[in-house]
Amino acid sequence: MSGNLLDSAIILAAGRGERMRPLTTHTPKPLLTCGGKRLIEWHLVSLARAGFERVVINTSHLSEQFAPALGDGSRWGLKIYYSQEGSIPLETGGGIYHALPLLQREQFLVVNGDVFCDVDFSAWRSPITGMAKLLLVDNPSQHPHGDFSLCDTGLVTDDGHDKLTFAGIGSYRSALWQNWRTVIPENDGTRSASPRFPLAPLLRHAMGQGLVFGVHHRGQWHDIGTPERLAALDTQMQTPHQESS
């Protein structure tokens, strides 16, 4: 890390984007264009502006398109590394676990490649307390019941009322994955050389130990889950932006 600040991030871009078909039949969802940029480029611009230097992108579906589109990251002042998962995505937990050797950091930021958010990533460079720090947002119409509760102390729990939605953005310690086999039930996916497993069970286990904290983001956040949502956001973003690509 640069001093004590986080300087590495991973953008999760391996999903098939089934709900986005036919748009994702020939283009990975993070490479779809919105507001004049690819979805993933909005993240790259924001990460570079915040001072992040190393970005890992995990890929699976149409993985061969990412490097020609994004290159080595130098156009944003970043160093991009690609964590290729093969034809079957490793899910969120497995994908991050697979990318740990490329991240090369004890703490790092994780960003879903298929969300749009105006969060200031510079506020996410500070070292975290506990195992994870999650960005939470108001529940969108397609997810009215939310995911986790945010206590006044900043702790995130799985058993409270007034739940918020996990935004797919958070900082983590690599130690969260250290004993993942004690949390994730063994199955065919976990027995493979590149194990597949979700992130949520690891988070809930850490929540039970009081090791997950959170922040309520009240700015823009969009889950680009359908072609209609992508089109709506694109229309909303027609006003010219000042960011340079």
Image: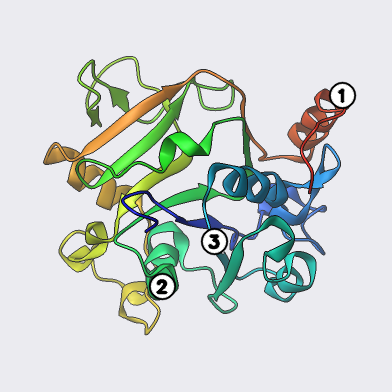
Q: Which circle marks residue 112 in the picture?
A: none
Would you place residue 61 above or below residue 206 in this image?
below
Q: Are marks 1 and 2 in contact (CB under 8 Å)?
A: no
Is 57 placed left or right of 39 in the picture? Answer: left
Q: Dot 1, how many residues are within 10 Å of its Cα: few (below 14), some (14-19), or many (20+)? A: few
Toward the viewer: 171 or 139?
171
Residue ID for mark 1: 239
Say whether residue 167 is visible: no
Q: Alpha-carbon neighbours of circle 2 within 10 Å: few (<14), some, or many (≥20)?
A: many
Helix, strand or loop for disc 2:
helix
Q: Depth check: give the residue in front, 162 or 70.
A: 70
Q: At x 39% / y 51%, what residue is drawn?
A: 6
Image quarter in which the N terminus is found: bottom left
Query: Rounded to the nearest whole Å, what is the CA distance between mark 3 and mark 2?
Result: 14 Å
Q: Which residue is mark 3?
A: 55
Q: Is residue 53 above or below residue 155?
A: below
Mark 1 vs mark 2: in front: 1
Picture coordinates of residue 203 (x, y %)?
A: 27, 46
User: Is 125 displayed left or right of 235 in the figure?
Assistant: left
Evaluate whether residue 185 shows in this view. yes
Residue shown at 79% from the left, 61% from the top: 27
Query: Which is more N-terminal, label 2 or label 1?
Result: 2
For disc 3, the neighbor class at 10 Å (few under 14, some 14 to 19, many from 20) is many
Seen from this angle, which residue lies furthest bottom?
193
> Can you tell which mark lies on residue 98?
2
Three-letter amino acid code at disc 2?
Answer: His
SS assignment at label 1: loop
Task: Please name the amino acid that badge 1 sits on.
Answer: Thr
Residue 1 as seen in the image, left or right of residue 78: left
Q: Earlier in the sequence, mark 1 or mark 3?
A: 3
User: Could you tell which of marks 3 and 2 lies nearer the N-terminus?
Assistant: 3
